């Protein structure tokens, strides 16, 4: 990034290949297929078709790489050749490479992934697991920070985890003990610290943490003109 | 015991036994080791009288006591974080901008009118500080939240600094602080420049300014 100069003008040849354009936008050098969440594509160059999952000529691909009926309506397959830009409400965007690995991520944070990865629903509600080899793109509220277990994480600050550290709940009841704790428990005077409950990770692996405890709010995923959100012409 | 900056919105603090820290409730993002988080009933340091003082002054922000042995990561609301290391001087800051601070710092409440009388009260209204502001004095570190990045402007004798009241975050040192008005007939008829009020800071110290006119 350069400072003090005018805006950077990109064309298809200067757009980065599978890399960030700036902290908030990612450019996919598409030659084949990518899975992406609806509404996260902001622009593209080239010849790209977007196929809804379940009604396209790509059933074979979907059968091999997409195992989440719960999220099928929110995802599409982009097929073709070109440069495709992804972004999500100016949140920080990062890409990650998995090599024969696994990573579990909050479902709203995942933007797109390469078909080398298989998407599955995690047994933890609200999370998705990616298994295999390939690149994926995820958004977070504030930059992502990698930490190693053992660690306890605020539930809202958790983005995901890789390589299977065992995630579990941790409740801190120490502050309820003693005379003051008893009064607090009975009357509510003194309040809570808001930090009585964390997710605890132990074992080998990586935990992904975002820089704030505010979750990205759920967003509508695309739609036809008329039912789509603001900014789309054709509203009745 | 300083904060280690992880990125612009995340700081890491080392907690050692016997030295407590205060932080805004809910601002912990992750921790390692044996650390406990206890709500501070009195909202900071001092006894019940200090608490009443803060409540009356509307400078009572929900704080918690962080104790134990380990590493704690703090961040809140996606705000940018700026750390200030104090070596004996006083930091003047709004209580709701405090993310975390060392327990070694003495926490106080200052009446805005004590710096400039009626104009001080007026200044508090314009900056959104209200009638009172929080002071932290001693040796230690403070993590302050701001909207947009924070930069420091030095204030030296004879070279006052003018700051938009909405972009003002905090100041430290021997800084006098006065509201400069440029209200003319244009403001009266609603055709003002939008910059009718400025804070003029003079003396010796530092003022912290955020790169945004949005309050927290």
Image (cartoon, helix red, strand yellow):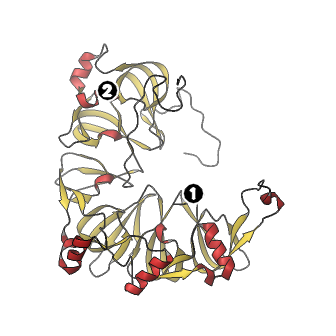
Left or right of A112? Residue B178 is right
Q: Going by the picture, which residue comes out furthest to the front?
A: A187
- Chain for numbered disc 2: A
In this figure, which residue is indicated by the disc labeled 1?
B214
- Chain for numbered disc 1: B
Tell me which corner region of the image, top left, top right, bottom left or bottom right, holds residue A59.
Answer: top left
Q: Circle 1: is it few (<14), some (14-19), or many (20+) Cα within 10 Å?
A: few
Give the answer, above or below, for where B167 lies relative to B110: above
Tell me which corner region of the image, top left, top right, bottom left or bottom right, holds residue B117.
Answer: bottom right
Q: Circle 2: is it few (<14), some (14-19), or many (20+) Cα within 10 Å?
A: some
Left or right of A192? Residue A178 is left
Residue pictured at 26% horizontal, 70% vertical? B70
Residue pictured at 30% horizontal, 16% vertical? A55
Q: CA distance from mark 2 to mark 1?
A: 38 Å
Residue B106 can be seen in this image: no
Cβ atoms under marks 2 and 1 closer than 8 Å: no
Number of residue marks: 2
Q: Position of residue B26 (x, y in %)?
A: 34, 63
Left or right of A85? Residue A69 is left
Q: Position of residue A208 (x, y in %)?
A: 30, 50
Mark linked to residue A67: none
Q: Going by the picture, which residue comes out furthest to the top?
A: A57
Give the answer, above or below, for where B34 lies relative to A159: below
Mark linked to residue A73: 2
Which residue is nearer to you in this view: A68 or A102? A68
Residue pictured at 51% horizontal, 33% vertical? A230
């Amino acid at each position: 990034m350069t400072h003090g100069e005018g805006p950077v003008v990109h064309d298809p040849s200067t757009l980065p290949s599978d890399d960030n354009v700036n902290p908030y936008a990612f450019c996919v050098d598409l030659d084949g297929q990518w899975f992406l969440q609806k509404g996260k594509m902001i622009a593209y160059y080239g010849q790209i078709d977007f196929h809804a999952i379940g009604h396209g000529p790509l059933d074979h691909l979907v059968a091999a790489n997409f195992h989440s009926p719960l999220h099928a309506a929110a995802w599409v397959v982009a097929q073709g050749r070109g440069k495709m830009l992804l972004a999500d409400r100016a949140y920080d965007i990062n890409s990650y490479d998995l090599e024969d690995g696994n990573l579990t991520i909050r479902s709203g944070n995942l933007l797109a992934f390469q078909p080398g990865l298989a998407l599955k629903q995690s047994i933890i509600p609200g999370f998705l697991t990616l298994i295999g080899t390939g690149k994926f793109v995820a958004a977070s509220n504030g930059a992502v920070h990698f930490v190693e277990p053992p660690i306890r994480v605020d539930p809202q600050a958790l983005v995901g985890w890789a390589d299977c550290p065992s995630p579990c709940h941790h409740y801190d009841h120490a502050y309820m003990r003693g005379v003051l704790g008893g009064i607090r428990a009975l009357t509510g005077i003194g309040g809570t610290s808001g930090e009585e409950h964390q997710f605890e990770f132990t074992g080998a692996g990586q935990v992904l943490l975002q820089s704030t405890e505010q979750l990205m709010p759920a967003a509508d995923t695309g739609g036809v003109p008329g039912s789509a959100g603001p900014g789309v012409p054709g509203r009745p | 015991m300083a904060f280690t900056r992880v990125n612009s919105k995340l700081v890491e603090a080392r907690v050692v036994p016997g030295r407590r820290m205060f932080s805004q409730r809910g601002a912990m993002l992750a921790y390692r080791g044996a650390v406990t988080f206890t709500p501070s009933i009195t909202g900071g340091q001092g006894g019940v009288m200090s608490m009443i003082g803060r409540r009356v002054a509307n400078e009572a922000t929900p704080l918690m006591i962080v104790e134990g042995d380990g590493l704690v990561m703090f961040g809140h609301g996606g705000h940018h974080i700026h750390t200030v290391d104090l070596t004996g001087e006083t930091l003047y800051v709004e209580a709701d901008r405090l993310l975390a601070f060392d327990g070694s710092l003495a926490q106080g409440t200052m009446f805005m009118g004590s710096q400039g009388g009626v104009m001080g009260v007026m200044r508090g209204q314009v900056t959104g500080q209200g009638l009172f502001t929080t002071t932290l004095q001693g040796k230690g570190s403070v993590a302050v939240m701001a909207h947009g990045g924070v930069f420091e402007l030095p204030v030296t004798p004879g070279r006052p600094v003018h700051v938009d009241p909405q972009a003002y975050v905090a100041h430290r040192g021997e800084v006098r602080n006065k509201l400069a008005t440029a209200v003319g007939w244009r403001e009266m008829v609603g055709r003002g420049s939008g910059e009718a009020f400025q804070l003029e800071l003079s003396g010796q110290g530092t003022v912290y300014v955020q790169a945004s006119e949005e309050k927290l």
